[in-house]
Image: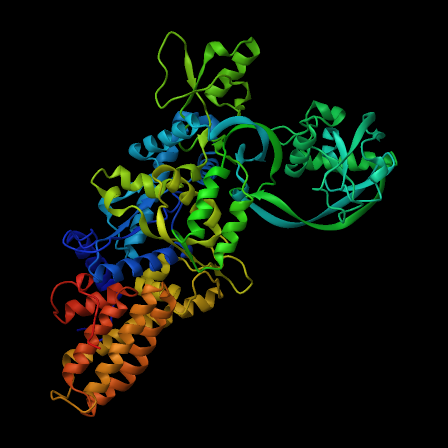
Amino acid sequence: MDKNYDHKKYEKDIYKKWEESGAFKPLGSARGKPFTIIMPPPNANGELHLGHATFIAVSDALIRYHRMKGEPTLWLPGIDHAGILTQVTFEKKLLKEENKSRHALGREEFFRRCYDFAISNKSAMENQMRALGSSCDWSREKFTLDPQISKMVFETFIKMHNEGLIYRGYRIVNWCPRCRSTLADVELEWQEKTDPLYYIKYGPFVLATVRPETKFGDTALAVHPKDKRYTKYVGQEIDVEGLLGKLKLKVIADEAVDMNFGTGVIKVTPGHDPLDWEIGQRHKLEIKSVIDFDGKLTSIAGPYAGMKVAEARKKVAEDLQNKGLIEKIDEKYVHQVATCERCNSTIEPLMSRQWFISIKPLAQKAIEAVESGEVKIVPEKFEKMYFNWMHNIRDWPISRQIWWGHQLPVWYSRKSQVTGEQITEFEKLVKNDSGARTDVLESPIVSIDKPTGDDEYIQDPDTFDTWFSSGQWPFTTLRANQSGDFEKFYPTTVMNTAYEILFLWVARMIMFGIYLTGKAPFKIALINGMLRDDKGLKMSKSKGNGVNPNEAIDQHGADAIRMALLSGRDNGNDLAISRNQMEQRIRGYRNFANKIWHASRYVSTSASNPKSSSKDKEFAEKLNKIVQHVTSSFEKYDLGIAAEKVYTEFWHWYCDVCIEENKKGELSNESLKNGLMVFLKLIHPFMPFVTEAVWQELELPGQLILQPWPVLPR
């Protein structure tokens, strides 16, 4: 053995041997229940980051442990096309490198180019996963746009539509003017902002709002039914002086009104606020659209039509003040503003016709699955968050006005577009030249294949929300293999992911899994915490506060990163650490890899006591307790505890104490060598490369990856 461990000398060759030997495939001769993890598919818009490295380290440790236990073990890898996120990323690349928009390419060419971009990223991410030691079965790898996957996604849509769970209708949606698409509630990011709060005169009332530009869409005023200040006004119509002249607004009572906000009176603008929409539905109020899909004021706003929202807000406020209709302005009102998680643009709540899932019937069964223990969320603290969101869930808009993704299997007859104006708009939609809306399309036909006949049929230009396809991931990936995998490996065992997508993805997988199969798709939802810097910000390469996994692997080896991400961490809890501290942590575990190497080198060449010794029994007893402790931690999914245990006991007991006892003749060579073999197995799930390298250098039988987990006599 060389004097020091050089990860560059071993890692690629070891991984190649593992893969070529079939070590990553489920063992056909293995008995017992399968242990299965379907990989959370990384988004095909760029390279992996430390968050991805965390789920890889966790999942691979579990897979290696259960494989060594002799169970039929499958880790199925995959990549997500990632809808809006990939489209936005590629559009930025296209603009920067070629100064072109997607419209300059046209939909077909844009999709082809975006596909090539995604596949290139897919290949790069697969290489990163290999470099991290991911022992997944690459022969079963899937992509969310694979033809077999796509067909099943379409079949689910058609099945849900035929059963009345999917409908097309007008509702208030979260609209991103930049992405020109609707977003679900869970796709929003809420940012704290400081804006003026305007106290505007409405007849006998004064009410507070941050959005004076939407006042042209007001259709009522609302107060809380228990607010005695305004009881006498409820049911009355009052005269209101506005910028476009006088109007009458009815005063209604609704329990959704917050008596403690502003003056306790709110203007109800059903077309531009989710709460106002709900109030409007209850009271059958008229809906007026003041802001269009470009984020500009409509003709309803009179002289303000065509202005962008921010410009209109400022101008409307000035004109209201000049007209004496503003009582006061709070310049430092702090509130939460919804933004697009993809491009950071401010979201506009707009009324739009979209495809929705009636989600509550699905949500109820998913709630019952967790309540009954069919699905266990680890750590348990996240169950409360899960239940809270699921009990308050709203219908899910699944149509997106983008080009990248699964295009809806929905068709429209050109003859059904009855007017010349509609036909013109229809042709715009087909070309998708400026993001024209689907509102003009009538009489949809839901079918995977284009309808046949004398009529001309055009496909709906919208695509599915990416979570609609990824929500079916455990079902579609196993079904697509057509090799009995679904029957053998479904339901899967563990789904390991971050808490930030507990609602975006985990909850939806449970809903879809139960709907499509009658069974939840996994037994354990193992939730990871996030990596945050010392300021509490999420670590990322783009922010410059995170460690680049590629550079860290090249410099320190994959084992060091894996241990740095796992050791001592509690499930679901964030790790707050500066970039420098993270780099030091990785270097520390690189040193641990060297410690394993040096200890193994001593055992192979320098062990000095061939005879049985007085401390052999004591050594065996403690080693047995370590095995039991690590095994128990694995079974409880406490990987941070297990990793910390093997690190501490190997360094501070085996190396610092036992090797020194061997040098003094107090511990036999046989005990020391047996102990090393046990520790190599215990450490292997966390640090697979250095342990496999030692196993091969010591010329021990077979590959360590396929050795049985240590079980010592009690």
Q: Is residue 693 above or below residue 173?
A: below
In this rendering, position of residue 182 left or right of residue 31: right
- Give the quadrant of the N terminus: bottom left
Q: How is the image coloured?
A: rainbow
Q: Tell me which corner region of the image, top left, top right, bottom left or bottom right, holds residue 393.
A: top right
The residue at the point 15 percent across, 88 percent down is: 608
> In this figure, what is the number of numbered marks?
0
- Which image quarter is the C terminus in? bottom left
Q: Nearer the viewer, residue 538 or 202?
A: 202
Residue 403 x/y as whole percent:
44, 30
Q: Is residue 327 above or below residue 292?
A: below
Is 464 on the left or on the right of 262, as rendered? left
Q: Tell me if residue 44 comes above or below residue 598 in the rendering.
A: above
**Does any portion of residue 179 appear in the rendered image?**
no
Res. 118 in view:
yes
Where is residue 219 shown, x and y percent of the image?
74, 29
**Residue positioned most to the top:** 454
Residue at image x 34%, y 77%?
648
Query: Looking at the image, which is closer to me, 576 or 231?
Result: 231
Query: Where does the image place residue 197, in percent across and percent down from the top left?
Result: 76, 45
Q: Is residue 269 left or right of residue 51?
A: right
Residue reaching furthest to the front: 372
Q: Position of residue 274 (x, y in %)?
A: 63, 37
